[in-house]
Amino acid sequence: MMISRSFKCLLAVTLVSSAALFIAPARAQAAEDLSTPKAALKTLFQAATSGDKQTVKDAVSGTEMELKVADVMVDMITEMKALNEAAKAKFGQIPDDFDDVSKLAGLVDQATVVETGDTAVISVPPPPRPEGAPKLTDEEAAAQAKANELKMVRVNGQWKLDISSMTQGEPLTDQHVQQFTAMAKAAKETTTEIKEGKHASYDAAMQAFGMKMMSAMMGGAMPPASEDEAGAPATEPAPAPAQ
């Protein structure tokens, strides 16, 4: 099952960097400001990364199923934040530290907004490309720019993210709910494994997490990490009995 690029963007950004994937889950309600498209988008990102489901619900517009998916996405972000924090506590400085809401807020500040009545399109600039990354072709750059366009709608004077505009015609279903739920479970299991010392390094932990995530996307189940998988010396087999 494929999720549209812009929908993935929301995951990685609002989910992840929005800072997400992370500090220990904060449950305090985010300050709600839905007065403008940009303010509403910032409110959504902050609420998603703090685990504030009610504000997320207030800041989006969609069908019952789309709202259900948004709800479980918040659970996934919360578990990803906990995983990120556990990794930092165990392994120190880590390469994939997403704990920075300010980066996303800065991108929203730089976004352009085109309002037409009760709808608006926010074009969020892409984050800087990694050093040494190949330059995008004009076609790739145009596709990325299009993927970073988010549609907002004004409902009863409040701006909200239109979830349906992010799926590019692909309806969200219970399968999406199950996948995001499984991804949250994978993050939670990996967090527990890190705290229990079952991974010798950050890379080992992320490899285990990646396998769990892949299994979740495929609908399977991965067993918990063993001592051997964590990088501990494997137990030598008993010698064969003498003839």
Image: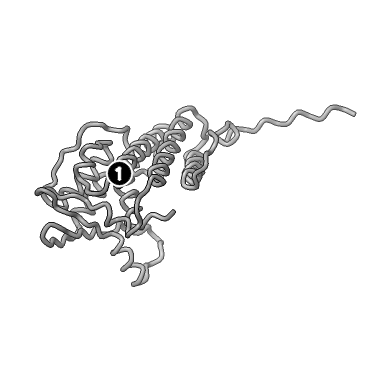
From this viewpoint, which residue is outermost toward the right? 243
Q: Residues within 10 Å of mark 1 (few under 14, many from 20)?
A: many
Residue 162, relative to residue 210: is it above or below? below
Q: Quadrant of residue 83?
A: top left
Q: Position of residue 92 (x, y in %)?
A: 41, 36
Residue 195 against residue 176 in the figure, above or below: above
Residue at 87 percent of width and 27 percent of height = 242
Which of 171 and 134 lies nearest the eye of the viewer? 171
Q: Is residue 173 left or right of residue 150?
A: right
Q: Position of residue 90 (x, y in %)?
A: 43, 32
Could you tell me how many numbered marks the image carries? 1
In the rendered image, residue 155, in percent from the top left (x then y), is placed at 13, 50
Within the image, what quadrant is residue 115 found in? bottom left
Disc 1 residue type (three-letter): Ala
Which element carries disc 1, helix, strand or loop? helix
Residue 140 at x, y = what percent?
A: 36, 68
Q: Which residue is mark 1?
A: 70
**Horizontal side of residue 6 vs 105, given as left or right:** right
**Foreground pick, 162 / 227:** 162
Q: Residue furthest front?
A: 64
Towards the viewer: 109 or 42 = 42
